[in-house]
Protein backbone atom coordinates (compact mmCIF):
# COMPACT_ATOMS: atom_id res chain seq x y z
CA UNK A 1 0.00 0.00 0.00
CA UNK A 2 2.84 2.41 0.85
CA UNK A 3 4.51 1.78 -2.49
CA UNK A 4 1.22 2.40 -4.25
CA UNK A 5 0.71 5.75 -2.55
CA UNK A 6 4.30 6.76 -3.27
CA UNK A 7 3.72 5.94 -6.92
CA UNK A 8 0.53 7.98 -6.94
CA UNK A 9 2.34 10.92 -5.35
CA UNK A 10 4.95 10.71 -8.08
CA UNK A 11 2.22 10.65 -10.72
CA UNK A 12 0.59 13.69 -9.13
CA UNK A 13 3.88 15.56 -9.21
CA UNK A 14 4.27 14.72 -12.89
CA UNK A 15 0.76 16.00 -13.48
CA UNK A 16 1.55 19.19 -11.58
CA UNK A 17 4.69 19.74 -13.66
CA UNK A 18 2.62 19.15 -16.81
CA UNK A 19 0.15 21.79 -15.65
CA UNK A 20 2.97 24.27 -15.14
CA UNK A 21 4.41 23.46 -18.57
CA UNK A 22 1.02 23.69 -20.29
CA UNK A 23 0.30 27.01 -18.59
CA UNK A 24 3.68 28.41 -19.58
CA UNK A 25 3.14 27.43 -23.22
CA UNK A 26 -0.34 28.99 -23.32
CA UNK A 27 0.83 32.17 -21.57
CA UNK A 28 3.76 32.51 -23.96
CA UNK A 29 1.55 32.66 -27.07
CA UNK A 30 0.33 36.26 -26.70
CA UNK A 31 3.75 37.32 -25.40
CA UNK A 32 6.07 35.50 -27.76
CA UNK A 33 4.02 36.17 -30.89
CA UNK A 34 2.55 39.50 -29.86
CA UNK A 35 4.01 41.48 -32.76
CA UNK A 36 3.02 38.88 -35.32
CA UNK A 37 -0.55 38.56 -34.07
CA UNK A 38 -1.00 42.32 -34.13
CA UNK A 39 0.48 42.45 -37.62
CA UNK A 40 -2.20 40.06 -38.79
CA UNK A 41 -5.06 42.32 -37.74
CA UNK A 42 -5.22 41.62 -34.01
CA UNK A 43 -4.83 45.31 -33.40
CA UNK A 44 -6.47 46.73 -30.25
CA UNK A 45 -6.79 50.26 -31.64
CA UNK A 46 -8.76 48.94 -34.61
CA UNK A 47 -10.79 46.19 -32.96
CA UNK A 48 -11.18 47.00 -29.26
CA UNK A 49 -12.19 43.44 -28.31
CA UNK A 50 -8.79 42.02 -29.08
CA UNK A 51 -7.27 42.91 -25.72
CA UNK A 52 -9.79 40.39 -24.37
CA UNK A 53 -8.36 37.86 -26.80
CA UNK A 54 -4.84 38.45 -25.55
CA UNK A 55 -5.94 38.66 -21.93
CA UNK A 56 -7.93 35.42 -22.00
CA UNK A 57 -4.98 33.44 -23.30
CA UNK A 58 -2.56 35.04 -20.87
CA UNK A 59 -4.95 34.63 -17.94
CA UNK A 60 -5.61 30.98 -18.75
CA UNK A 61 -1.90 30.22 -18.94
CA UNK A 62 -1.12 31.98 -15.68
CA UNK A 63 -4.02 30.30 -13.84
CA UNK A 64 -2.99 26.84 -15.01
CA UNK A 65 0.58 27.56 -13.88
CA UNK A 66 -0.67 28.68 -10.45
CA UNK A 67 -2.77 25.56 -10.08
CA UNK A 68 0.22 23.49 -11.07
CA UNK A 69 2.48 25.17 -8.48
CA UNK A 70 -0.14 24.80 -5.72
CA UNK A 71 -0.76 21.22 -6.73
CA UNK A 72 2.95 20.47 -6.64
CA UNK A 73 3.12 21.93 -3.15
CA UNK A 74 0.14 19.85 -2.07
CA UNK A 75 1.77 16.59 -3.14
CA UNK A 76 4.49 17.13 -0.54
CA UNK A 77 1.84 17.44 2.19
CA UNK A 78 0.15 14.12 1.45
CA UNK A 79 0.86 11.74 4.32
CA UNK A 80 1.36 8.04 3.83
CA UNK A 81 -1.11 6.02 5.92
CA UNK A 82 -1.14 2.27 6.07
CA UNK A 83 -4.59 1.94 7.54
CA UNK A 84 -6.43 3.71 4.74
CA UNK A 85 -6.83 2.80 1.16
CA UNK A 86 -5.68 5.54 -1.16
CA UNK A 87 -8.36 7.86 -2.45
CA UNK A 88 -6.23 8.93 -5.40
CA UNK A 89 -6.77 5.93 -7.63
CA UNK A 90 -9.30 7.63 -9.88
CA UNK A 91 -6.70 10.24 -10.93
CA UNK A 92 -5.20 7.69 -13.33
CA UNK A 93 -8.01 7.93 -15.94
CA UNK A 94 -7.76 11.73 -15.94
CA UNK A 95 -3.98 11.54 -16.17
CA UNK A 96 -4.22 9.17 -19.12
CA UNK A 97 -6.56 11.58 -20.87
CA UNK A 98 -4.17 14.48 -20.27
CA UNK A 99 -1.20 12.47 -21.50
CA UNK A 100 -3.05 11.10 -24.53
CA UNK A 101 -4.50 14.43 -25.67
CA UNK A 102 -2.54 17.35 -24.26
CA UNK A 103 0.97 16.26 -25.08
CA UNK A 104 0.35 15.29 -28.74
CA UNK A 105 -1.48 18.55 -29.35
CA UNK A 106 1.28 20.56 -27.71
CA UNK A 107 3.98 18.73 -29.66
CA UNK A 108 2.09 19.08 -32.95
CA UNK A 109 1.26 22.73 -32.31
CA UNK A 110 4.84 23.62 -31.43
CA UNK A 111 6.21 21.79 -34.48
CA UNK A 112 3.77 23.36 -36.94
CA UNK A 113 4.06 26.75 -35.29
CA UNK A 114 7.84 26.76 -35.55
CA UNK A 115 7.71 25.50 -39.14
CA UNK A 116 5.27 28.14 -40.26
CA UNK A 117 6.88 30.84 -38.16
CA UNK A 118 10.10 30.27 -40.06
CA UNK A 119 8.14 30.18 -43.30
CA UNK A 120 6.29 33.36 -42.28
CA UNK A 121 2.88 31.83 -42.79
CA UNK A 122 1.46 32.94 -39.48
CA UNK A 123 -2.14 32.98 -40.54
CA UNK A 124 -2.04 29.20 -40.05
CA UNK A 125 -0.54 29.67 -36.60
CA UNK A 126 -3.64 31.59 -35.56
CA UNK A 127 -5.97 29.04 -37.11
CA UNK A 128 -4.07 26.14 -35.56
CA UNK A 129 -3.98 27.72 -32.11
CA UNK A 130 -7.73 28.29 -32.18
CA UNK A 131 -8.42 24.79 -33.53
CA UNK A 132 -6.18 23.09 -30.97
CA UNK A 133 -7.71 25.11 -28.15
CA UNK A 134 -11.26 24.22 -29.14
CA UNK A 135 -10.48 20.51 -29.56
CA UNK A 136 -8.59 20.38 -26.28
CA UNK A 137 -11.34 22.29 -24.48
CA UNK A 138 -14.16 20.09 -25.74
CA UNK A 139 -12.44 16.79 -24.98
CA UNK A 140 -11.10 17.78 -21.58
CA UNK A 141 -14.37 19.41 -20.59
CA UNK A 142 -16.23 16.12 -20.92
CA UNK A 143 -13.63 14.43 -18.77
CA UNK A 144 -13.73 17.40 -16.40
CA UNK A 145 -17.49 17.06 -15.90
CA UNK A 146 -17.03 13.48 -14.77
CA UNK A 147 -14.14 14.48 -12.56
CA UNK A 148 -16.08 17.31 -10.91
CA UNK A 149 -19.03 14.98 -10.35
CA UNK A 150 -16.71 12.61 -8.50
CA UNK A 151 -15.30 15.49 -6.47
CA UNK A 152 -18.78 16.36 -5.23
CA UNK A 153 -19.33 12.80 -4.07
CA UNK A 154 -15.94 12.31 -2.39
CA UNK A 155 -15.25 14.73 0.44
CA UNK A 156 -11.70 13.73 1.19
CA UNK A 157 -10.29 14.08 -2.31
CA UNK A 158 -6.98 15.90 -2.51
CA UNK A 159 -7.00 19.55 -3.61
CA UNK A 160 -4.48 18.93 -6.32
CA UNK A 161 -7.10 16.92 -8.21
CA UNK A 162 -9.56 19.77 -7.91
CA UNK A 163 -6.96 22.09 -9.32
CA UNK A 164 -6.29 19.73 -12.21
CA UNK A 165 -10.00 19.48 -12.99
CA UNK A 166 -10.15 23.27 -13.37
CA UNK A 167 -8.03 23.14 -16.52
CA UNK A 168 -10.89 22.11 -18.84
CA UNK A 169 -13.09 24.92 -17.54
CA UNK A 170 -10.34 27.50 -18.01
CA UNK A 171 -9.64 26.29 -21.55
CA UNK A 172 -13.35 26.27 -22.35
CA UNK A 173 -13.71 29.88 -21.24
CA UNK A 174 -10.59 30.83 -23.16
CA UNK A 175 -11.77 29.06 -26.32
CA UNK A 176 -15.21 30.64 -26.09
CA UNK A 177 -13.70 34.10 -25.65
CA UNK A 178 -11.40 33.65 -28.63
CA UNK A 179 -14.24 32.36 -30.81
CA UNK A 180 -16.43 35.28 -29.79
CA UNK A 181 -13.77 37.80 -30.70
CA UNK A 182 -12.79 36.15 -33.97
CA UNK A 183 -16.31 35.62 -35.24
CA UNK A 184 -17.93 38.65 -33.67
CA UNK A 185 -19.15 41.55 -35.81
CA UNK A 186 -16.56 44.06 -37.03
CA UNK A 187 -16.44 47.33 -35.18
CA UNK A 188 -14.01 49.58 -37.07
CA UNK A 189 -14.77 52.45 -39.42
CA UNK A 190 -12.89 52.95 -42.68
CA UNK A 191 -10.37 55.76 -42.75
CA UNK A 192 -10.90 58.49 -45.37
CA UNK A 193 -8.56 59.03 -48.30
CA UNK A 194 -6.45 62.20 -48.23
CA UNK A 195 -8.56 65.10 -49.44
CA UNK A 196 -6.00 66.04 -52.08
CA UNK A 197 -5.70 62.56 -53.66
CA UNK A 198 -6.47 63.28 -57.33
CA UNK A 199 -8.19 60.02 -58.29
CA UNK A 200 -9.18 56.69 -56.79
CA UNK A 201 -11.55 53.90 -57.79
CA UNK A 202 -12.29 50.39 -56.56
CA UNK A 203 -11.22 47.68 -59.01
CA UNK A 204 -11.98 44.55 -56.97
CA UNK A 205 -14.20 44.16 -53.92
CA UNK A 206 -15.09 41.25 -51.66
CA UNK A 207 -18.11 39.43 -53.04
CA UNK A 208 -17.86 40.85 -56.57
CA UNK A 209 -18.07 38.56 -59.61
CA UNK A 210 -19.00 35.58 -57.42
CA UNK A 211 -15.68 35.50 -55.53
CA UNK A 212 -15.18 35.74 -51.80
CA UNK A 213 -12.06 37.92 -51.83
CA UNK A 214 -9.56 39.48 -54.22
CA UNK A 215 -5.95 39.74 -53.12
CA UNK A 216 -2.37 40.17 -54.36
CA UNK A 217 -2.75 43.03 -56.87
CA UNK A 218 -0.18 43.47 -59.63
CA UNK A 219 -0.22 45.99 -62.43
CA UNK A 220 1.52 46.66 -65.73
CA UNK A 221 1.18 49.31 -68.43
CA UNK A 222 1.40 47.88 -71.95
CA UNK A 223 3.31 49.63 -74.73
CA UNK A 224 0.04 50.94 -76.20
CA UNK A 225 -0.98 52.46 -72.85
CA UNK A 226 -3.43 49.77 -71.71
CA UNK A 227 -3.30 49.25 -67.95
CA UNK A 228 -3.71 45.67 -66.78
CA UNK A 229 -4.65 45.08 -63.13
CA UNK A 230 -4.18 41.44 -62.10
CA UNK A 231 -5.40 39.79 -58.88
CA UNK A 232 -5.94 36.46 -57.17
CA UNK A 233 -9.68 35.73 -57.08
CA UNK A 234 -10.25 33.55 -54.03
CA UNK A 235 -13.40 31.50 -54.33
CA UNK A 236 -14.38 30.30 -50.85
CA UNK A 237 -12.47 32.43 -48.35
CA UNK A 238 -9.75 35.02 -47.99
CA UNK A 239 -6.93 32.64 -47.09
CA UNK A 240 -3.77 31.95 -49.09
CA UNK A 241 -4.75 28.32 -49.73
CA UNK A 242 -7.74 26.91 -51.58
CA UNK A 243 -9.25 27.41 -55.00
CA UNK A 244 -8.27 30.70 -56.58
CA UNK A 245 -8.12 31.99 -60.14
CA UNK A 246 -5.88 34.46 -61.90
CA UNK A 247 -8.01 37.36 -63.12
CA UNK A 248 -7.42 40.70 -64.83
CA UNK A 249 -9.26 43.94 -65.55
CA UNK A 250 -8.06 46.47 -68.12
CA UNK A 251 -8.29 50.20 -68.60
CA UNK A 252 -7.86 51.98 -71.94
CA UNK A 253 -8.17 55.53 -70.56
CA UNK A 254 -5.50 55.80 -67.91
CA UNK A 255 -7.52 54.11 -65.17
CA UNK A 256 -10.70 56.15 -65.35
CA UNK A 257 -12.85 53.22 -66.46
CA UNK A 258 -12.25 49.49 -66.38
CA UNK A 259 -13.41 46.45 -68.31
CA UNK A 260 -15.28 43.60 -66.68
CA UNK A 261 -13.37 40.78 -65.04
CA UNK A 262 -11.54 38.31 -67.28
CA UNK A 263 -10.44 34.94 -65.87
CA UNK A 264 -7.00 34.14 -67.32
CA UNK A 265 -6.24 30.86 -65.52
CA UNK A 266 -8.58 28.58 -63.56
CA UNK A 267 -7.92 24.92 -62.94
CA UNK A 268 -10.17 22.78 -60.75
CA UNK A 269 -9.62 23.39 -57.05
CA UNK A 270 -6.03 24.52 -57.50
CA UNK A 271 -4.38 27.61 -56.07
CA UNK A 272 -3.41 29.81 -59.03
CA UNK A 273 -1.56 32.95 -58.07
CA UNK A 274 1.58 35.02 -57.47
CA UNK A 275 1.09 36.80 -60.77
CA UNK A 276 4.20 38.60 -62.00
CA UNK A 277 3.82 40.45 -65.32
CA UNK A 278 6.59 42.13 -67.29
CA UNK A 279 6.57 44.08 -70.56
CA UNK A 280 9.20 43.30 -73.19
CA UNK A 281 9.73 46.72 -74.77
CA UNK A 282 11.59 45.13 -77.67
CA UNK A 283 8.76 42.89 -78.86
CA UNK A 284 5.84 44.57 -77.12
CA UNK A 285 4.83 41.24 -75.60
CA UNK A 286 3.52 41.00 -72.05
CA UNK A 287 4.86 38.00 -70.18
CA UNK A 288 3.16 36.68 -67.04
CA UNK A 289 4.96 34.29 -64.71
CA UNK A 290 2.77 32.61 -62.10
CA UNK A 291 2.50 29.57 -59.81
CA UNK A 292 0.18 26.66 -59.20
CA UNK A 293 -0.17 25.40 -55.64
CA UNK A 294 2.86 27.51 -54.65
CA UNK A 295 4.94 24.71 -56.08
CA UNK A 296 5.02 24.73 -59.88
CA UNK A 297 5.96 27.71 -62.05
CA UNK A 298 4.43 28.64 -65.43
CA UNK A 299 4.75 31.29 -68.14
CA UNK A 300 2.22 32.72 -70.60
CA UNK A 301 2.28 35.77 -72.84
CA UNK A 302 0.17 38.17 -74.86
CA UNK A 303 1.22 39.56 -78.23
CA UNK A 304 -1.62 42.11 -78.43
CA UNK A 305 -1.24 44.13 -75.22
CA UNK A 306 -3.34 41.79 -73.09
CA UNK A 307 -6.29 41.15 -75.38
CA UNK A 308 -5.50 37.46 -75.93
CA UNK A 309 -3.15 35.08 -74.18
CA UNK A 310 -1.11 32.01 -74.96
CA UNK A 311 -1.56 28.64 -73.26
CA UNK A 312 0.48 28.42 -70.02
CA UNK A 313 3.77 26.51 -70.29
CA UNK A 314 5.49 25.01 -67.25
CA UNK A 315 9.06 26.17 -66.48
CA UNK A 316 9.44 24.68 -62.99
CA UNK A 317 12.48 22.57 -63.85
CA UNK A 318 14.34 25.62 -65.12
CA UNK A 319 13.69 27.93 -62.16
CA UNK A 320 13.24 25.73 -59.07
CA UNK A 321 15.70 23.38 -57.36
CA UNK A 322 14.63 19.91 -56.23
CA UNK A 323 15.10 20.54 -52.50
CA UNK A 324 12.98 23.71 -52.48
CA UNK A 325 9.51 23.56 -50.97
CA UNK A 326 7.23 26.59 -51.14
CA UNK A 327 7.77 28.61 -54.31
CA UNK A 328 6.24 31.93 -55.35
CA UNK A 329 6.88 34.43 -58.10
CA UNK A 330 6.44 38.17 -57.50
CA UNK A 331 3.88 39.07 -56.55
CA UNK A 332 4.74 42.34 -58.27
CA UNK A 333 5.78 43.30 -61.79
CA UNK A 334 9.10 42.29 -63.32
CA UNK A 335 11.55 44.54 -65.15
CA UNK A 336 13.55 44.62 -68.38
CA UNK A 337 17.23 45.45 -68.08
CA UNK A 338 19.10 47.74 -70.44
CA UNK A 339 20.54 44.71 -72.26
CA UNK A 340 17.02 43.35 -72.91
CA UNK A 341 17.00 40.72 -70.15
CA UNK A 342 13.61 40.12 -68.56
CA UNK A 343 13.90 39.67 -64.78
CA UNK A 344 11.32 38.44 -62.27
CA UNK A 345 11.61 38.51 -58.44
CA UNK A 346 10.55 35.34 -56.60
CA UNK A 347 10.94 33.54 -53.28
CA UNK A 348 11.16 30.00 -51.93
CA UNK A 349 11.60 27.89 -48.80
CA UNK A 350 14.53 25.55 -48.32
CA UNK A 351 15.32 23.85 -44.99
CA UNK A 352 12.36 25.72 -43.47
CA UNK A 353 13.95 29.10 -44.23
CA UNK A 354 12.76 31.81 -46.59
CA UNK A 355 14.90 33.14 -49.43
CA UNK A 356 14.25 35.71 -52.10
CA UNK A 357 15.71 35.15 -55.56
CA UNK A 358 15.32 36.18 -59.19
CA UNK A 359 14.70 34.36 -62.45
CA UNK A 360 15.53 35.85 -65.83
CA UNK A 361 15.23 35.38 -69.59
CA UNK A 362 17.84 36.54 -72.10
CA UNK A 363 15.83 35.51 -75.15
CA UNK A 364 12.64 37.56 -74.74
CA UNK A 365 10.75 35.06 -72.60
CA UNK A 366 11.42 31.87 -74.53
CA UNK A 367 13.63 30.28 -71.85
CA UNK A 368 14.13 31.15 -68.20
CA UNK A 369 17.07 30.73 -65.83
CA UNK A 370 17.61 30.86 -62.08
CA UNK A 371 19.56 33.61 -60.32
CA UNK A 372 21.00 33.93 -56.82
CA UNK A 373 19.39 33.98 -53.36
CA UNK A 374 18.87 36.58 -50.66
CA UNK A 375 18.44 34.73 -47.32
CA UNK A 376 15.95 36.05 -44.80
CA UNK A 377 13.73 37.62 -47.43
CA UNK A 378 10.65 36.65 -49.34
CA UNK A 379 8.45 38.78 -51.64
CA UNK A 380 10.75 41.23 -53.42
CA UNK A 381 10.77 44.06 -55.92
CA UNK A 382 13.71 45.01 -58.15
CA UNK A 383 15.03 47.88 -60.24
CA UNK A 384 18.15 48.38 -62.34
CA UNK A 385 20.39 51.20 -61.17
CA UNK A 386 22.21 53.62 -63.45
CA UNK A 387 25.50 51.66 -63.22
CA UNK A 388 23.79 48.40 -64.18
CA UNK A 389 23.59 46.95 -60.66
CA UNK A 390 20.30 45.37 -59.58
CA UNK A 391 18.75 46.71 -56.38
CA UNK A 392 16.39 44.37 -54.54
CA UNK A 393 13.97 45.62 -51.90
CA UNK A 394 12.60 42.67 -49.92
CA UNK A 395 9.92 41.80 -47.41
CA UNK A 396 11.81 40.58 -44.35
CA UNK A 397 10.57 37.49 -42.51
CA UNK A 398 9.95 39.58 -39.39
CA UNK A 399 8.10 42.88 -38.99
CA UNK A 400 10.24 45.97 -38.60
CA UNK A 401 12.02 47.19 -41.71
CA UNK A 402 12.68 46.35 -45.34
CA UNK A 403 15.59 44.16 -46.34
CA UNK A 404 17.75 45.34 -49.25
CA UNK A 405 20.49 43.80 -51.39
CA UNK A 406 22.65 44.65 -54.41
CA UNK A 407 23.76 42.46 -57.31
CA UNK A 408 26.68 43.52 -59.48
CA UNK A 409 26.36 40.53 -61.85
CA UNK A 410 22.76 40.72 -63.08
CA UNK A 411 21.18 38.81 -60.21
CA UNK A 412 23.54 35.84 -59.95
CA UNK A 413 24.97 36.90 -56.57
CA UNK A 414 23.79 39.36 -53.94
CA UNK A 415 25.73 41.39 -51.40
CA UNK A 416 25.25 44.28 -48.95
CA UNK A 417 22.23 42.43 -47.54
CA UNK A 418 20.95 44.60 -44.72
CA UNK A 419 17.89 46.23 -43.18
CA UNK A 420 16.97 49.72 -44.34
CA UNK A 421 15.87 51.49 -41.17
CA UNK A 422 14.38 54.36 -43.18
CA UNK A 423 11.75 51.99 -44.59
CA UNK A 424 9.41 50.66 -41.87
CA UNK A 425 7.50 47.56 -42.91
CA UNK A 426 5.16 45.07 -41.15
CA UNK A 427 6.51 42.01 -43.02
CA UNK A 428 4.46 42.72 -46.11
CA UNK A 429 4.99 43.01 -49.85
CA UNK A 430 6.18 46.32 -51.32
CA UNK A 431 6.91 47.65 -54.79
CA UNK A 432 9.48 49.64 -56.79
CA UNK A 433 9.52 51.45 -60.12
CA UNK A 434 12.14 53.51 -61.92
CA UNK A 435 11.33 56.58 -64.04
CA UNK A 436 13.17 59.44 -65.67
CA UNK A 437 13.87 62.41 -63.45
CA UNK A 438 12.04 65.39 -65.01
CA UNK A 439 14.27 67.77 -63.08
CA UNK A 440 17.55 66.36 -64.37
CA UNK A 441 17.97 65.06 -67.91
CA UNK A 442 19.43 61.57 -68.14
CA UNK A 443 18.95 60.82 -64.46
CA UNK A 444 16.51 58.39 -62.87
CA UNK A 445 14.39 58.54 -59.76
CA UNK A 446 12.88 55.58 -57.94
CA UNK A 447 9.48 55.25 -56.29
CA UNK A 448 8.64 52.75 -53.56
CA UNK A 449 5.23 51.85 -52.11
CA UNK A 450 4.35 49.80 -49.04
CA UNK A 451 2.34 49.70 -45.84
CA UNK A 452 4.73 52.03 -44.06
CA UNK A 453 4.43 50.86 -40.47
CA UNK A 454 6.89 48.68 -38.59
CA UNK A 455 4.15 46.56 -37.05
CA UNK A 456 0.71 46.99 -38.62
CA UNK A 457 -0.48 46.62 -42.19
CA UNK A 458 -1.62 50.19 -42.68
CA UNK A 459 -0.47 53.61 -43.96
CA UNK A 460 -0.05 52.95 -47.68
CA UNK A 461 2.78 55.31 -48.59
CA UNK A 462 4.75 56.22 -51.71
CA UNK A 463 8.38 57.37 -51.31
CA UNK A 464 10.93 58.86 -53.71
CA UNK A 465 14.67 58.32 -53.92
CA UNK A 466 16.88 60.64 -55.97
CA UNK A 467 20.14 58.84 -55.16
CA UNK A 468 19.86 55.29 -56.50
CA UNK A 469 17.68 53.98 -53.62
CA UNK A 470 20.19 54.95 -50.93
CA UNK A 471 17.88 57.41 -49.19
CA UNK A 472 14.14 58.11 -49.38
CA UNK A 473 13.73 61.80 -48.73
CA UNK A 474 10.12 62.40 -49.82
CA UNK A 475 6.99 60.44 -48.94
CA UNK A 476 3.27 60.76 -49.56
CA UNK A 477 0.51 58.99 -47.63
CA UNK A 478 -2.15 57.53 -49.94
CA UNK A 479 -4.31 55.89 -47.28
CA UNK A 480 -3.94 55.89 -43.48
CA UNK A 481 -6.12 52.87 -42.66
CA UNK A 482 -5.58 49.14 -43.12
CA UNK A 483 -3.60 48.49 -46.30
CA UNK A 484 -1.33 45.77 -47.54
CA UNK A 485 0.05 44.67 -50.94
CA UNK A 486 0.62 47.25 -53.67
CA UNK A 487 2.00 47.76 -57.16
CA UNK A 488 3.17 50.88 -58.98
CA UNK A 489 3.24 51.64 -62.70
CA UNK A 490 4.21 54.65 -64.78
CA UNK A 491 1.04 55.02 -66.84
CA UNK A 492 1.94 58.18 -68.76
CA UNK A 493 5.59 59.20 -69.14
CA UNK A 494 4.81 62.51 -70.85
CA UNK A 495 2.79 63.78 -67.88
CA UNK A 496 4.71 61.75 -65.23
CA UNK A 497 1.44 60.14 -64.16
CA UNK A 498 1.75 57.16 -61.84
CA UNK A 499 -0.77 54.52 -60.87
CA UNK A 500 -0.79 52.67 -57.55
CA UNK A 501 -2.90 49.56 -57.07
CA UNK A 502 -3.25 48.43 -53.45
CA UNK A 503 -5.29 46.43 -50.95
CA UNK A 504 -7.26 48.29 -48.28
CA UNK A 505 -10.09 47.80 -45.83
CA UNK A 506 -11.75 48.66 -42.53
CA UNK A 507 -11.58 45.45 -40.48
CA UNK A 508 -9.54 43.40 -42.92
CA UNK A 509 -6.70 44.80 -44.97
CA UNK A 510 -7.92 43.36 -48.28
CA UNK A 511 -11.63 44.06 -48.35
CA UNK A 512 -11.03 45.74 -51.71
CA UNK A 513 -8.32 46.57 -54.23
CA UNK A 514 -8.25 50.20 -55.29
CA UNK A 515 -6.53 52.03 -58.12
CA UNK A 516 -5.16 55.49 -57.39
CA UNK A 517 -3.68 57.90 -59.91
CA UNK A 518 -1.44 60.91 -59.30
CA UNK A 519 1.45 62.82 -60.82
CA UNK A 520 5.02 62.97 -59.62
CA UNK A 521 4.40 66.56 -58.55
CA UNK A 522 1.68 65.33 -56.21
CA UNK A 523 4.16 63.13 -54.36
CA UNK A 524 6.95 65.73 -54.35
CA UNK A 525 4.70 68.49 -53.05
Image (cartoon, rainbow, N blue to C red):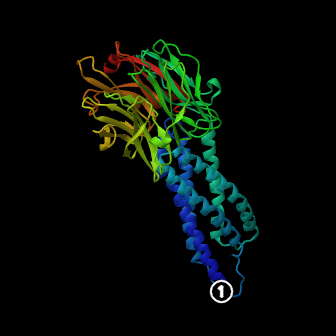
Which type of secondary structure does the marked residue at label 1 adopt? helix
Q: Can you say whether 457 is above or below 490 in the image? A: below
Query: On screen, 32 above or below 284?
Result: below
The spot of residue 130 in percent (x, y) is: 60, 49
Can residue 67 be seen from the camera position used here? yes
Residue 339: image location, x then y, percent: 31, 28
Quadrant showing the C terminus: top left
Residue 206: x and y in percent read 59, 27
| Figure quadrant of residue 417 | top left
Q: Is residue 189 visible?
A: no
Whether 253 is drawn above or below 157: the answer is above
Q: Nearer the viewer, residue 65 or 193?
A: 193
Q: Report how many numbered discs are placed on residues in the image.
A: 1
Q: Residue at x 60, y 70 (%)?
A: 15
**Which residue does the image show at 64% across and 78% down from the upper left?**
8
Which quadrant holds residue 490?
Answer: top left
Query: Going 62% across and 36% down the picture, which residue do you hit?
Result: 243
- Crowd band around label 1 with a 10 angstrom C-alpha radius: few (<14), some (14–19), many (20+): few
Task: Locate residue 229, reporting x and y percent.
Answer: 50, 23
Which is more toward the observer, 276 or 79? Answer: 276
Q: Which residue is mark 1?
A: 2
> Is 351 rendered above or below residue 261?
below
Amino acid sequence: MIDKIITEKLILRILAFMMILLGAIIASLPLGFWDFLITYQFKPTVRPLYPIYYGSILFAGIMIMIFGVLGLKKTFLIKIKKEKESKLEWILPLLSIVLAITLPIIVLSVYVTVSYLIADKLYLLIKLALFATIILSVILTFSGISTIFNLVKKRGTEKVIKMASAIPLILLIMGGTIAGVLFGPPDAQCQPYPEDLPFKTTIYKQGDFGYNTFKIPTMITAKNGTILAFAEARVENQEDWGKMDMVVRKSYDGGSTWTSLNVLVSEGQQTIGNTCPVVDNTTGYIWVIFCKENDRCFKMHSEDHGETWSVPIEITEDVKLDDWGWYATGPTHGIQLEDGTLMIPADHIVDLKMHAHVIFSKDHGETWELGGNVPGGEEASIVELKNGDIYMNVRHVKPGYRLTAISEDKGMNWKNISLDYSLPDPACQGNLIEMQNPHSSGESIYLFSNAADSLHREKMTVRISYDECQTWTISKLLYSGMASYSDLSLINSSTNTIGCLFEKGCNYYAEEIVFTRFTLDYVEN
